[in-house]
Image (cartoon, rainbow, N blue to C red):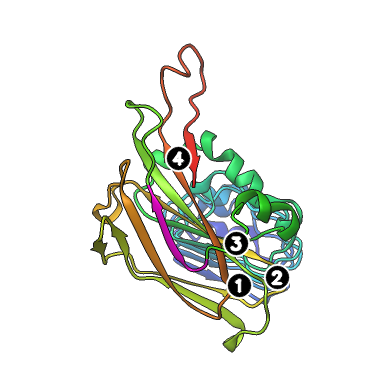
Amino acid sequence: MLPDSICNLTCLNHLLVGKNNLSHLPSEIGDLDSLVTLNVEENDVCTIPDSISNIPRLRRIQLNNCAKLRSLPKLPRCNYVFAEHCPSLESLPLELDQLGRWRADYSESNKLAENNFLTSLLKQLPKSKGLSELEDVVRIIVPVAGDGEVPIWFPCHDGRGPNVSFVVPPSPSVKQKMLGWILRVLIEASREVPYQYYSFCIYEVICNKIKKRNFVLPFYVNASNVDHVWLMYIPQGYEGLQLQGGDEVEIPIREYGDSLKNWAIDLIYEADDEIHKGTDTLYQEVVSI
């Protein structure tokens, strides 16, 4: 076990304690103000202390193959979160900005699919409070319950394939501005792929036939017997891309493995003050394509 006194090392930048048979982390780990990287892979921890959300410089947390890990606290500042193959992981924060900022990989943590985590996350979107503050892309990979969730969140059963194209509908209200949009990609389960993983990449976004080449977004998923969803949130204005009603958008996705089977788009607009006048809660509006 780690001694509690390690939390006094306020100048510590990297804590690498993978494969050490640890059953828990010190509750005051949030006192490690200078910590940038935390690697706890292949240990027996069941939870991560809530205080971890207080570490101002934490950018990377690695939890792969923690077989007993059941839940994660809010991770608002982490750019990279890796919790692959954590079979007991059953719950995560439901705020999109608290799961990992740049890349959050929960692939093969299949209990999340059993608990319909994707459905819970997407239903929470209108209530998410941090979306308006996001300035960078958020990418999340989660397993999905094929029979229960896929027909709900990917209603086009013909299989749209890897090339995304859509027309932005008019704003729900003249006063409502778009906060951002989400691309959801369905990755079909299969173990018959080279190198035991699926590889994908977005190299550009084409808006009204004008190519935006600053979008270089690669990702991969280990070959699995469970479907996965790659969910990507793009803030309005990211890399100069401002979507508005009537825009024609194309997103070619280069894939290796022929496993990308469907996609969907969620457009997220700010709350309408008129609809919520006199109430304490403002819900954003989500339009799905």
The mark closer to the camera, 4 or 3, is 3
Amino acid type shown at disc 1: Val
Label 2 with label 1: CB-CB less than 8 Å: yes
Q: Can residue 115 be seen in this view?
A: yes
From the viewer's perspective, tell me whether residue 188 is left or right of residue 130.
Answer: right
- Residue found at the very far top of the displayed protein: 278
Q: In which quarter of the image is the N terminus?
A: bottom right
The mark closer to the camera, 2 or 1, is 2
Sooner in the amino-acid sequence: mark 2 or mark 4: 2
Of helix, strand and loop, which one carries label 3? loop
Label 2 with label 4: CB-CB less than 8 Å: no
Amino acid type shown at disc 3: Asp
The mark closer to the camera, 2 or 4, is 4
The residue tagged 4 is: 130
The mark closer to the camera, 2 or 3, is 3
Amino acid type shown at disc 2: Asn
The residue tagged 2 is: 43
Sooner in the amino-acid sequence: mark 2 or mark 1: 1
Sooner in the amino-acid sequence: mark 1 or mark 4: 1
Cα distance, mark 2 to mark 4?
A: 32 Å
